[in-house]
Amino acid sequence: DTGVSQDPRHKITKRGQNVTFRCDPISEHNRLYWYRQTLGQGPEFLTYFQNEAQLEKSRLLSDRFSAERPKGSFSTLEIQRTEQGDSAMYLCASTSTGTGSGYTFGSGTRLTVV
Amino acid sequence: RKEVEQDPGPFNVPEGATVAFNCTYSNSASQSFFWYRQDCRKEPKLLMSVYSSGNEDGRFTAQLNRASQYISLLIRDSKLSDSATYLCVVNTWMDSSYKLIFGSGTRLLVRP
């Protein structure tokens, strides 16, 4: 499978716990994006990487959120001290261009904070 | 005001109907435009790009009006399998880079 892979598919955690999600992009794509989607809304931009450099973080992203892409390949998104409001689908997308076309999304990680 | 606005629907139509979705965007410097389709609990998938000259892909026709900052999608001869949420998406400059900005989506239900 040469698509974008995300792991885990589902995560249930207790409030206050830390969680980490992984995204493996398409190998030749140098840009990787994280989005968050809540019920009834479209995906919202969180952050993006070009190769290993994190070039932008949304103002939506509190200090509890951190993302890495250590070797310009896979990426991780960590949420510390989770809150119920963090419950959402976390989507990863990759592309080789900045034009907007050719974004491929992963299946997402659905986080439920109880 | 949201960057990309859509009617949330749902649009409930019979098989074979023609249905049209509209979308407006606020940033006149937006670079490129798309419709994505999202099935329930699945990831968004690119349906088609949208060009000023209008473009068609089978039963789907997309149109862009840059002057009015308006995007449309027309679906002819609706099929049951067209039931999904349709996301209007704009590649726009926000903060310090171009990125995809999504509308909230328009839900389509096609009934037998």
Image: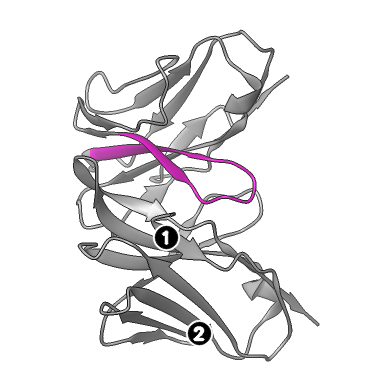
Residue B106, percent across and down? 59, 66
Region rendered in magenta: A31-47
Residue A89, percent across and down? 57, 37
Please identify the quarter of the rendering in which residue B110 is found: bottom right
* Chain designation of label 2: B
Residue B58, percent across and down? 46, 87
Left or right position of B104 against A102: right
Please identify the quarter of the rendering in which residue B108 is found: bottom right
Rate crowding at label 1 as few (under 14), some (14 to 19) or many (20 or more) other CA atoms within 10 Å. Answer: many
The residue drawn where x is 53% and y is 43% is A107
Q: How is the image coloured?
A: one colour
Instruction: Look at mark 2 in the image and give the residue it sits on.
Output: B74
Q: Nearer the viewer, residue A10 or A62?
A: A62
**Image position of B91 with respect to A43: above or below:** below
Instruction: Look at mark 1 in the image and give the residue it sits on.
Output: B4
Which amino acid, by three-letter code, is at mark 2?
Leu
* Chain designation of label 1: B
Left or right position of B48 against B20: left
Tell us which disc is closer to us: 1 or 2: 1
Magenta stretch contains residue A36: yes
The residue drawn where x is 66% and y is 12% is A15
Report helix, strand or loop for mark 2: strand
The residue drawn where x is 61% and y is 90% is B18
Per the picture, the main secondary structure of the magenta-coloured stretch is strand
